[in-house]
Image: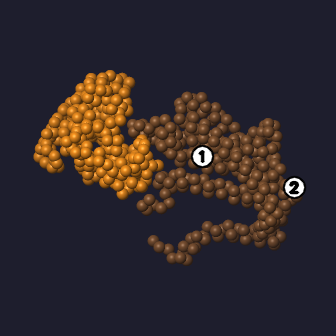
Amino acid sequence: MSLSSTERLTHRLAPWVLPVLLLAIWQLAVSAGWLSTRILPAPSAVIEAGVNLVRSGEIWTHLAISGWRAGVGFAIGGSIGLALGFITGLSKWGERLLDSSVQMIRNVPHLALIPLVILWFGIDETAKVFLVALGTLFPIYLNTYHGIRNIDPALVEMSRSYGLSGFRLFWHVILPGAMPSILVGVRFALGFMWLTLIVAETISASSGIGYLAMNAREFLQTDVVVLAIVLYAVLGKLADLAARGLERVCLRWHPAYQVHKGGAA
Amino acid sequence: MSNLQQPANLLRGIPVKVRNLKKAFGAREVLKDIDLHIPAGQFVAVVGRSGCGKSTLLRLLAGLDKPTSGQLLAGSAALSDAREDTRLMFQEARLLPWKKVIDNVGLGLSGDWRPKAHAALEAVGLAERADEWPAGLSGGQKQRVALARALIHQPRLLLLDEPLGALDALTRIEMQQLIERLWQQHGFTVLLVTHDVSEAVAIADRVLLIEEGEIGLDLLVDLPRPRARGSYRLAALETEVLNRVLSIPGSPPEPEPFSPLPTQLRWAN
């Protein structure tokens, strides 16, 4: 089956038709005055606001601080989740002692803790990092635990009969076996990471993208508000791409992730 | 790797002795009282109906399960001391999907094992697939990799738990010939569990039939190798074993079950 080049181009462009059309209608609606700029600014105005923020350099400080909060929170929450998942997944006693407690805490929506977190840490960085860590901990914990529990016992038995035990068994068999599940956890956690950060920054912050949006709201700068939303979307997409890249690297062996099928590796 | 191509006269197999072996899972006795002596380097095939305990015997020999009572000996020492010299091939290949073929072969080895692994893959005819993922191999190829993985440890006792059961007929015969050839080269002791009686008589020196946890038949297959498949003598031996298997049903005949519905078709169950 070979497509002609024009056909292939049409296939490539087809998914973009609707978004571009919507943007055009949006632009038209604002410039024709059907839509008040107080409700929604024109796409061109959003781009302009972005260009201005880039020129003044302000956008980079906000991006950097938001990225730092997300990254540190994810690193802390992810590590704790991974460690807890390993403990409960690898030892019967760990499971008995910890799993039901962790599952109970998991059922508390972490954003419901915001008032308490503000009381504990005030509104400084610790509070936001804490919330992000809490939001990313559970998806990684759950998926690590399930990943380890779902490893084919036949493979573990085989590896033991070939003399693997202790750390070598963990490194060569259990960790790679649980990796697909752990990475699903990472993707979920990255989603929760931005979601938590958006809420935390919107409620209490003096910098960051959420602050940018809330500050602009005070001055009715809808263009900056929309820009902040777009920034969050882009950051979320980037995190997702990073997770996919990680899957490509870590799960090269998995038939579902092999890009070049049938080629001699 | 010179060791992989050892001359046949240098027998390095383990002689296996089994004394009063019993294994029960709860109240169910799977192996009742097995006494067995396998001389070094013998190729033994163990046949029997499914659930007769033949796989259990192999798992006990491999040390994957503990016997309820009885002794397993390698020569005069305990078989558990020869764990390093014992390798088991499973019904499924059990390759680690996240390791390349060659890394699967080298599983559990340390030091400079790659040349050895290459040699082992070459012995099973898969040297050129060394750097592929197991997911891309066929069932027969996977089992050949599993065989290479067992051979690299230079086992003195090779336990095969129906490793050919899932393969198509032609691949099976190829694998049987490969196993036979490697056995002749290395001289290890082999215990092959199979439900295929023709496979058992074609490849083994001795066929053991296990019936309800006991050795029901111990038959020497004293035919020269290479054996011609489909020969009259093989067929005669196969018939002998099959007659024995089929004449003794797996369980004592039960009374016809009472059918609650008069219209039930009895012959349909």
Q: Nearer the viewer, mark 1 or mark 2?
A: 1
Chain at numbered mark 2: A
Q: Are marks 1 and 2 on the same chain?
A: yes
x and y percentages locating residue A66 in the rendered image: 75, 52
Task: Residue at the far left: name it.
Answer: B232
In percent of width and height, residue B243 lies at 17, 37
Residue under pointer 1: A185
Extreme residue toward the right, this view = A219
Q: Taking the image as drawn, is residue B211 in sight?
A: no
Check residue A218 in the rendering and tell me which mark sits there, or answer none.
Answer: 2
Quarter occupied by residue A106:
top right
Amino acid identity at mark 2: Glu
Closest to the observer, B107 or A200 = B107
Label the orange chain with its letter: B
Residue, x 44% and y 38% (percent of image)?
A164
Specify the subunit that label 1 lies on. Answer: A
* Colour given to chain A in the rendered image: brown
Q: Taking B24 as reference, is A2 above or below it? A: below
Number of other residues with Cα within 10 Å of mark 2, as a class: few under 14, some 14 to 19, many 20 or more: few
Observer-nearest of B250 and A10: A10
Q: Which badge, 1 or 2, is on the more N-terminal residue? A: 1
Give the percent coordinates (x, y) of residue B193.
Answer: 28, 38
Q: Which residue is at 23% across, 48% downward?
A: B181
x, y percent for residue B201: 19, 42
Which residue lies at the image location 67% right of the left edge and 35% below the top edge? A105
Q: Is residue B3 above or below residue A61?
A: above
- A162 displayed left or right of A139: left
